[in-house]
Amino acid sequence: MRTIAVVLGVWAFLLTALPAAAQNKVPPDRPLEALVKATLLTFNDANVTGNYEVFHAKAARPFRDQFTPEKLKTTFGEFSKNRIDFDIVAAMTPVYVPKPVVDSDGKLVVKGYFPTEPSRVNFELEFIPSDGEWKMIRIYVKTEPRAEPKNEKN
């Protein structure tokens, strides 16, 4: 009977430790892509609507403590002012440069871009483990015109 209790105790420990251990690794391709897209699309929705409540609520607590929805609206006002809408990223695959990593502080660092037209969507995102999932702690998004290939004269 004691052996069963020990085995159950070890099993329970492993079940609770696995989600935490999984947070120390970069997620597999599909969950990583879903995380990036969900973050950027929520951000895009906030910019398009001017309502940053949901974007704020989905972020990690330290981010929420530092930035109110009103401060986010002011900070990212250029996106609304310039009518930047990049929801097309939902149908595209991100290009990661460099490869995503979990840094020495335990943050998931994901940088890259979506090869959108006519402007490219560049992003830098950082996530921390919170409530058994990765939550955004830092976001940097920039759209820029894609470089046009130079015509060479023959």
Image (cartoon, helix red, strand yellow):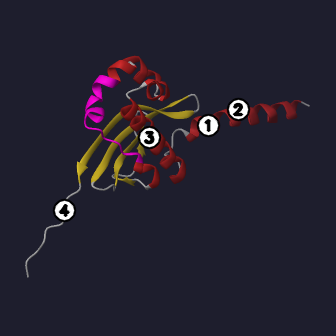
Asked if the magenta segment contains residue 83, the reply would be yes
- The residue closer to the viewer here, 46 or 102, is 46
Q: Quadrant of residue 143?
A: top left
Task: Give SS at disc 1.
Answer: helix
Q: Return the residue found at the far right.
A: 1
Residue type, numbered disc 3: Leu
Report the residue marked by disc 4.
148
CA–CA distance in space, label 3 to label 2: 36 Å
Q: Which residues are magenta?
A: 73-87
Is 88 situated left or right of 119 in this image? right
Residue 60 at what x, y percent from top left? 46, 26
Q: Nearer the viewer, mark 3 or mark 2?
A: 3
Nearest the camera: 72 or 36?
A: 72
> Which quadrant of the rendered structure holds the C terminus?
bottom left
Q: Residue at x 38, y 52 (%)?
A: 99
Residue hosting label 3: 41
- Determine which residue is flagged by label 1: 19
